[in-house]
Amino acid sequence: MKAILNKNALLLCLLLPFAASAQEPIDESRSVSANERISIEVMRGTVRIRPSDDNVFRVRGTIDEDAEGYTLESENGFTSFEIDYPRSSRGRNWSDGDDGSQLEIEIPQGSELEFEGVSVDVDVMGITGGSEISTVNGDIIASELGNFVHLAAVNGEIDSRNNSGRIDISTVNGEVTDNGSTGRIEYSTINGEIRANSSATEVSISTVNGEADFRLSGTQVLELSTVNGDIDVRLADSLSPRIDGSTVSGDLRLALEPAISASFDISANSGGDIENDFSDERPSRDRYGPRKHLNFSTGTGAGSVNITTISGDIELVPL
Amino acid sequence: MNDRDDIAPHSSDDDALDLAIQALPRSQNPARDLWPALQAQLPPRRARRAPWSWAAAAVVAALVLSIWIRPDLGPSSVTAPPLAQLDSPTAEHSLLNVYETQKASQMATLNFSNPSVSRQLAIWDGAVQQVRGALSYYPEEPRLLRQLDRLYRQQLSYLETLAMVDPQVAAYY
């Protein structure tokens, strides 16, 4: 009998540390305003944010085993929720360890949301009061957001679906996919690739090394900028757009409506080629310098297409 | 009587001449590249305002003044450049003067080293060199100056982000 007790005591001692570090459940809610300003900070894990049917902030799930708890404060229209870590966690590598927090959060649809994390995957949908979502390594899925929408990651991928308003999507190395966006949108990456299918009326695309592949519809104002990355744009349903683009050594291909009415001013300053399948005009070369020009107009010349390159190639083709 | 009435009717020879003239190309390229020989005979080059220099000066002045008056519009924390810099020899040098100073000061604030950041900055440096190469042919060309300006703004924005994030997070860049 004594031997059995000793064995049980030994087993208990072995299991206790695991029990202490297991993920703690959480189930909290607070009544909030319909347009509550809500900030959420989760360093690692998976977070799903959905609009609630009532004016309630609700969080359920489990919190990171390495966390020492959480802080939930709500007053005067401001609600903040944060997973707390011991001070010794400062400077830790958030990619290490297990799964982190697993959370389902509901907030009023009209809330203004700010979410911040490091190695956390976040999936947010249906918030129309404005959303600012940023992660370092985690992926972002953002759907049906409205108003001001800011999505930022360093290495994480961003998947944007049917967002509207003033949208700003940026990564350093992560890939960006955008489908169904409307309003005004700005894409910015350093090395990440961008693929988009957008109906935004104003679009700005900036990349350093990343490639960009765009299918745009009805865009009236388009800005393109790349250093080394190639940009391929198909712009449909836009007969007099204003397009400004520049590239250093990346190639830029523009497919435009055959009935476009615009003045074209294309220049390649040092080695870049200009290929025009849009009209019979061919680029001319400076007599005493390396620059090539292509200037022509179609229709009444209502829109404008101004592109400059250093050594990248420019290609103009009809859709 | 109008002016046309004063013009004698064209003879068939005149018509033929007109047709021949119309058939001539509007410009004629030399049979060989004459530039090297011409260049060798030129005196040393002096700083000269190109026809578009006012436009270029306006671009640079606008850029520098916008940064001076509204620092939030330019790369963050851009310090006001002394207006004396506007008297620099070329617009290109004015831009370089402003931005290289700013870049150096931001670099000095970074308290970490990351090889991928260095590689990234080297890519921008290479692009800057390409644009400057084009500017050597077309000094003060506004589009090239804007491109140079954009490249530096991208770099400074990148450096600013690095300076703001936790050094541990900056390691992921």
Image (cartoon, helix red, strand yellow):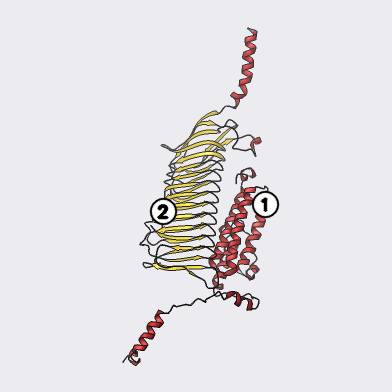
Q: Quadrant of the N terminus of chain B?
A: bottom left
SS state under label 2: strand
Report in which chain the residue with disc 2 lies. Answer: A
Mark 1 and mark 2 on one chain: no
Report which residue position mark 1 lands on: B109
Report in which chain the residue with disc 1 lies. Answer: B
Q: Amino acid at mark 1?
A: Thr
Q: Position of residue A212 (x, y in %)?
A: 48, 52
Q: Residues within 10 Å of mark 1 (few under 14, many from 20)?
A: few
* Residue situated in front as seen by the camera: A207 or A64: A207
* Location of residue B7 with respect to B52 vertically, above or below: below
* Residue situated in front as seen by the camera: A109 or A179: A179
Q: Residues within 10 Å of mark 2 (few under 14, many from 20)?
A: many
* Residue situated in front as seen by the camera: A107 or A228: A228
Q: What mark, if any, has residue B142 been given in the picture?
A: none
SS state under label 1: helix
Q: Amino acid at mark 2?
A: Leu
Q: Position of residue A181 (x, y in %)?
A: 42, 49
Q: Position of residue A275 (x, y in %)?
A: 45, 62
Query: Cβ–Cβ below 8 Å for labels 1 and 2?
Result: no
Q: Nearer the viewer, mark 1 or mark 2?
A: 2
* Residue situated in front as seen by the camera: A252 or A244: A252
Which residue corresponds to the image point at 64% horizontal and 45% vertical from the top-left? B167
Q: Is residue B74 visible?
A: no
Which residue corresponds to the image point at 58% horizontal and 30% vertical from the top-left? A65
Q: Is residue A170 visible?
A: yes
Locate residue A294 relative to residue B45 in the image: left or right. left
Residue extending farthest top: A1
* Location of residue B3 with respect to A124 vertically, above or below: below
Q: CA distance from mark 1 to mark 2?
A: 41 Å
Q: What mark, if any, has residue A216 been given in the picture?
A: 2
